[in-house]
Image (cartoon, rainbow, N blue to C red):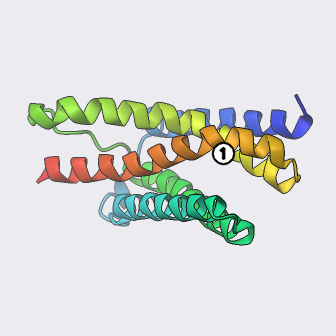
């Protein structure tokens, strides 16, 4: 394993552990409870924009428009990075939002989607970063092989991020 890939995996593990600590251990700031309440919706928007950029990038690579593919994938990466910053800010300020369990019908659908979203987001982080590294280091054969797995994984995480938010908003009404 090369040093950059080992570093990517190390950073991904550290980021995941930090997020678990932030969500499940660190108390939310009570003072900020009524401020920045737009963050969860912004997170869903950024996930949706990332998914759109991924689909556009997929179209461009299929039509052999490499420069446009690269621009689309960079755009998806920027949206996902902004999502991560907003996600961290939201959880630092507001903590976790629990699904109202009284709504059992939707909860049975919500929970597996949420769990798969969380688990696959953890898996996707280092894979997305390694795929970018391979492209930026011009190792295109390895990039193509890994991107076949990265694309559907990243797309699923982006789309289910929106779905989870929509389901949570609907349940809270």
User: In screen coordinates, is 99 left or right of 63?
Assistant: left
Q: Position of residue 84 (x, y in %)?
A: 55, 53
29 and 145: which is toward the camera: 145
Q: Quadrant of the C terminus?
A: bottom left
Q: Is residue 166 left or right of residue 130?
A: left
* Label 1 element class: helix
Mark 1 — residue? 128
**88 left or right of 5 in image:** left
Residue lying furthest front: 63
Relative to residue 73, is residue 101 depicted above or below?
above
Q: Quadrant of residue 39?
A: bottom left
Query: Looking at the image, which residue is at 45% across and 44% down?
Result: 156
Q: Position of residue 109 (x, y in %)?
A: 22, 33
x%, y% of residue 34?
29, 63
Pinpoint residue 42: horizontal percent, then vertical percent: 40, 65
At horizontal 45% and vertical 35% (from top left) the residue drawn is 118
């Amino acid at each position: 394993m090369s040093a950059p890939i080992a570093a990517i995996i190390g950073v991904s593990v550290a980021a995941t552990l930090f997020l678990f600590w932030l969500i499940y251990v660190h108390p939310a700031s009570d003072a900020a409870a009524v401020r920045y309440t737009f963050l969860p919706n912004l997170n869903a928007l950024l996930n949706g924009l990332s998914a759109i950029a991924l689909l556009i990038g997929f179209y461009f690579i299929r039509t052999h428009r490499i420069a446009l593919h690269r621009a689309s994938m960079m755009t998806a990466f920027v949206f996902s990075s902004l999502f991560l910053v907003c996600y961290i800010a939201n959880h630092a300020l507001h903590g976790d939002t629990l699904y109202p369990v009284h709504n059992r019908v939707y909860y049975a659908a919500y929970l597996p989607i949420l769990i798969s979203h969380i688990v696959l987001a953890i898996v996707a982080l280092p894979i997305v970063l390694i795929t970018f590294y391979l492209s930026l280091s011009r190792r295109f054969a390895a990039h193509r092989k890994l991107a076949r797995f990265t694309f559907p994984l990243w797309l699923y995480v982006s789309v289910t991020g929106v779905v989870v938010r929509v389901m949570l908003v609907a349940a809270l009404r």
